[in-house]
Each structure stands twice: as structure tokens, then as C-alpha cells.
Amino acid sequence: METHAPGLPPAQPAPASGASRLLSGCALILLTACCAFYLSGALVRLATRGELVLRQAGLEETRLWLVRQPESSGLGLSDSRRISGEQAENRVCLRTRIRFLLLRSDGSRTALEECRCYDLRGEAWIAGPSCTAPGGLP
């Protein structure tokens, strides 16, 4: 079944109008400006406070901080994830991975992993004993 007039080629979609391309270009520029504004704000906050912390849920967080020691300087990144327990319980165990990107180093800082349990006492989480995480972490 033909959807176009007999003897004429099928209709082609109309090319994007100048207004449509202009709108797409403006949207792209606005998105780029918003990303640049957010990134510059994050860098200013990192420089003034020395750290950025993104909390996911409860005790779980991702943290970026400046390392400013006479023998080492650069960035540190830690990432804490729950491996057992629930927030509603009185004990939660977290695996924390710590990595460093150092511009100047004395060699003492390396990537670390830690497993620690936290106990809820009143409204505060208190660091408890080390735990054994899946994968053989002590």
C-alpha cells in the first residue's frame, strides 16, 4: 500500500529548522556551563574545607580529601560500603577502601582496606571491633 502520491517520490522528513538547531546548541551550552559551575564549586569547597563527603545511606560514604603533609601531598579517596547488618539493627559492618593520588610522596602511603563494625549506642554509632569481610579481609 502506497502512502504517497503515485509517480512522486516518497516524502522526506523536513530538515531541522534553524530554530531547532539553535535550541539544541543553547541547551548544550547551558548543560556545559552548569557542569563547569558545579565542578568549580566542588573544587573551591575542597580547597577551603580540605574535603568533600558524599553520603549514600547512613554510615556509607565516599570521601575525597587533600593530603597536606611535609613529606606527602596530593589527594586521598575513601569509599565505605556496608557488608553486613542493617541500619535498623544495632550493629553494622563496613568495608572501607582508601586510595591515594600523591604528587609528592615519601612512599609511606599505599592503598588500604579495612573492615570495621559499628555499634549503635543511643543516637551515635561507635566504632567497634575489626571484622572479617568476604574476600579474606581481617
Image (cartoon, grey):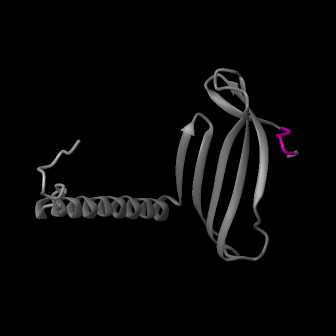
Q: Dividing the picture into quarters, in which one does residue 108 lie?
A: bottom right
| Horizontal relation, residue 131 to residue 95: left or right | right
Q: How many marks?
A: 0
- At x 29%, y 63%, the residue is 33
**Is-magenta flag for residue 8?**
no
User: From what the image shows, is residue 118 above or below residue 52?
Assistant: above
Quadrant housing the C terminus: top right
User: What residue lies at 77% left-to-right and 65% top-to-bottom?
Assistant: 110
> Which sits in the foreground, 34 or 110?
34
| Most common secondary structure along the magenta stretch | loop
Q: Where's residue 47, x and y in %?
A: 48, 65
Which quadrant holds the N terminus?
A: top left
* x and y percentages locating residue 26 in the rendered image: 20, 62
Task: Give the camera-side residue of 93 and 33.
Answer: 33
Q: Which residues are magenta?
A: 131-135
- The residue at the point 43 percent across, 59 percent down is 42
